[in-house]
Amino acid sequence: MESLKSLLAVSLAAILAYFEPVHHVLTAILLLIALNFIFGLVAGIVANKEPFSFRKAFACVREASVFLLVLASVFFIGDHLGARGESLQAVSTIAYALAYFYSVNICKNLRELFPESKPIAFLYYLLSIEVLSKLKDRYDACID
């Protein structure tokens, strides 16, 4: 049994060492996922008066697992194709896209928690690109 624990520990250490070049990205995405979960949970319970849902919680865990697997796979495949720099760039690009979408969702949950907060409403307005739809409406009104 002790040798199995040692084997697992060494295997985990080897995997963590291999993914060290992207560990900051993975850590940042994990932090955003945790914040999204926490603010979504609090907004659901406090603002929307919803009970805790294991279904939603497990959906969040599944989604997080898929995103982390995609990031790790992109790095692994790119590294094994001999394009480590390009794979790091691809991981970074995917991470920025994930960070954007999680940030929008976090701001939406904050807006539900603090509906009277003008800074949070403005930040959500900017991040959610609602400003672009308003500009299009104004442009269309000017054309007509």
Image: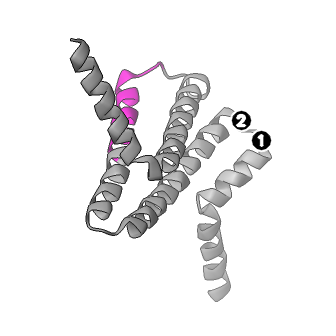
**Residue furthest top in the image:** 1
Of all residues, the one furthest to the bottom in this rendering is 143
Q: Reply above or below: 90 against 43.
A: below
Residue type, mark 1 in image: Ser
Residue beneath disc 2: 114
Q: Nearer the viewer, residue 133 or 3?
A: 3
**Helix, strand or loop under label 1:** loop
Image coordinates of residue 126 in percent, x first then y, are 67, 60
- Give, as a single range, the part of the protein colored magenta: 51-66
Between 18 and 102, the one nearer to me in the picture: 18
Residue at figure coordinates x 71%, y 48% from the top left: 121
Q: Is residue 50 magenta?
A: no
- The image's mark for residue 117 is 1
Mark 2, secondary structure of its residue: loop
Q: Does 140 appear above or below 30?
A: below
Q: Position of residue 141 (x, y in %)?
A: 65, 80
Q: State the separation of the CA atoms marked 1 and 2.
A: 6 Å
Side of 142 where 72 appears, left or right: left
Task: Please tell me the numbered disc located at residue 129.
Answer: none
